[in-house]
Amino acid sequence: MLSVKNLHASVDGKEILRGIDFEVKAGEVHAIMGPNGSGKSTLASVLAGNEKFTVTEGSATFLGQDLLAMSIEDRARAGLFLGFQYPVEIPGVTMANFMKLAVNEQRKFRGQEPLSAAEFLKLMREKSAVVELDAKLTSRAVNEGFSGGEKKKNEIFQMAMLDPKLAILDETDSGLDIDALRIVATGVTKLHTPQNATVVITHYQRLLDYIVPDVVHVLYKGRIIHSGDKTLALKLEKEGYDWLINEYKE
Amino acid sequence: MAALTDILSGFRSVGSERLRIGDDSDAVQPFVAVDSAKLRVEVAAGVSARLVVVHEKPLASSLSFLLERGAQLEVTEVFLGEAFAEVRTVQAADSSCCLTAVQLAGANVSYRIDLDGAHAASRVGGLFLAAESEHCVMELRTAHNVPDCTSDSLMKGIAGGNAVGEFRGLVYVAPDAQRTDARQQSRNILLSETARIDAKPQLEIYADDVKCSHGATVGQMDAEAILYMRQRGLSLAQARRLQIEGFAGDVVRRCGIGELGEALMEAVARKMETM
């Protein structure tokens, strides 16, 4: 589904990603871990198409298409979803209005008819239940005045609405209490099918108690220095990153 | 502008230079005045009324609204042409006046509001959209002449191209106007490097027991919000439009006539497409 080869990217002339290689297949869950400043969020932003970053080398193929040649919105319409670490507030724009536009724009891209008002409302009700999102929030402005937990639930709600092929969740677990974490993680698990894939970027093992990864990658100084199965996350939780970093230096 | 014209044609037209609204039956259907060079509206004690003022031609006009004790008036003023308007509002005790001004062309409007009776309340929402080489001016002077009055203004401006926008606000609080509660906000967005908006909210306070706040911001479109919306599949143009609608919406929807507010939002969106 996603194939990233030797990906280099920089911001303001400073190289952040220094040769990333990894491959995600349908039905898989990947976790990307690593110390602060290793480039995890940059990787998510570059794959989503954030124009702040410049790709200087390498390639990324998504469902057979050259991902790096596509605009942000075309990547989204092709089925790539980014759950933001810091979801943005959009004053004066209601969630319902925003989602209706987004869902129908993506349907149009896939040659589908727009949803009727009734179909859309039904979809919103169904999907808000997935993350136990208070239905009232959908009539409020996007993320405005939402609590930290509500913002993250709202990201997963949008993921449920848009039904992406590949979801990249950038530190969706940060700042969540244990209940919100359970709800968010359970939501992500419910949405997982053999046809889609999820990449979770996280600092902590605790999210991976709920979302069990097939592969765990460790990112350090803009490179994946180690990949392993789910037991790697447990080992990192216990022993930290130093043993890997030392190994990498040798 | 069909939708707007249709809605206005359903309202009752003001023919003369002087209108006295004496009972509540008039509140059911709003009044509408189009291109009045001079208009004086009096709202009798305890009466509620709604008025729409439309400036289509590039004319100068002088309007005054007098609210007697406990009267309520809601005015929506729409500028479709390069008009020049001076609007004076005088409010007696317990009266409340809500003004919503939307400038869709390079107009110049100056409001002067006198709160002359205790517990009078003023609420003003203003929006201008300045495109190309248009010049929009909004001036608002609110005078708290007696104690215990409240005023709340939210003025927003959007300028693109080489346009210039100006907001000048003044809240005056007279020496004995204690327990005044006055809020004044100006929020502005520049769509181009060559557009300019000057926002000057000012306070002149001579009483000591008051709650007054004022603030002004001039910024660009929120790049993070645009990115967020595009990541969900909206095009750049849609994301910009949605953001501007969100920005303008809370002023325009202050207009208490629902269908008119929606028609104005459509007009705002259409103008935005040219900016």
Image: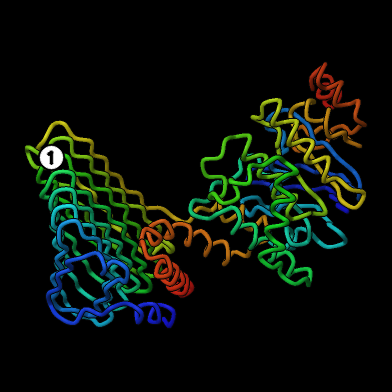
Left or right: A39, with B114 as reference point: right
Picture residue at 14% right of the left edge, 50% below the top: B115
Secondary structure under tag 1 reads: loop
The reply to whether residue B62 is in sight is no
Asked whether B212 or A24 is in front, the reply is: B212
Q: Position of residue B181 (x, y in %)?
A: 23, 40
The reply to whether residue B84 is in sight is yes
Q: Label 1: chain? A: B
User: Crowding at label 1, few (<14), some or many (≥20) Cα neighbours within 10 Å?
Assistant: many
Asked whether B26 or A234 is in front, the reply is: B26
Vertical position of residue A239 compared to residue A167: above or below: above
Left or right: A238, with B1 as reference point: right
Picture residue at 50% right of the left edge, 53% below the top: B222
Quadrant housing residue B192: bottom left
Q: Position of residue B245 (x, y in %)?
A: 48, 62
Q: Position of residue A102 (x, y in %)?
A: 66, 60
Q: Position of residue B238 (x, y in %)?
A: 58, 65
Left or right: A189, with B139 as reference point: right
- Residue identified by numbered label 1: B147
Left or right: A66, with B235 as reference point: right
Quadrant housing residue B146: top left
Vertical position of residue B34 compared to residue B218: above or below: below
Classify the position of the N terminus of chain B by image quarter: bottom left
Picture residue at 10% right of the left edge, 50% below the top: B116
Query: Which amino acid lies under the numbered mark 1 shown in the image of this protein?
Result: Pro
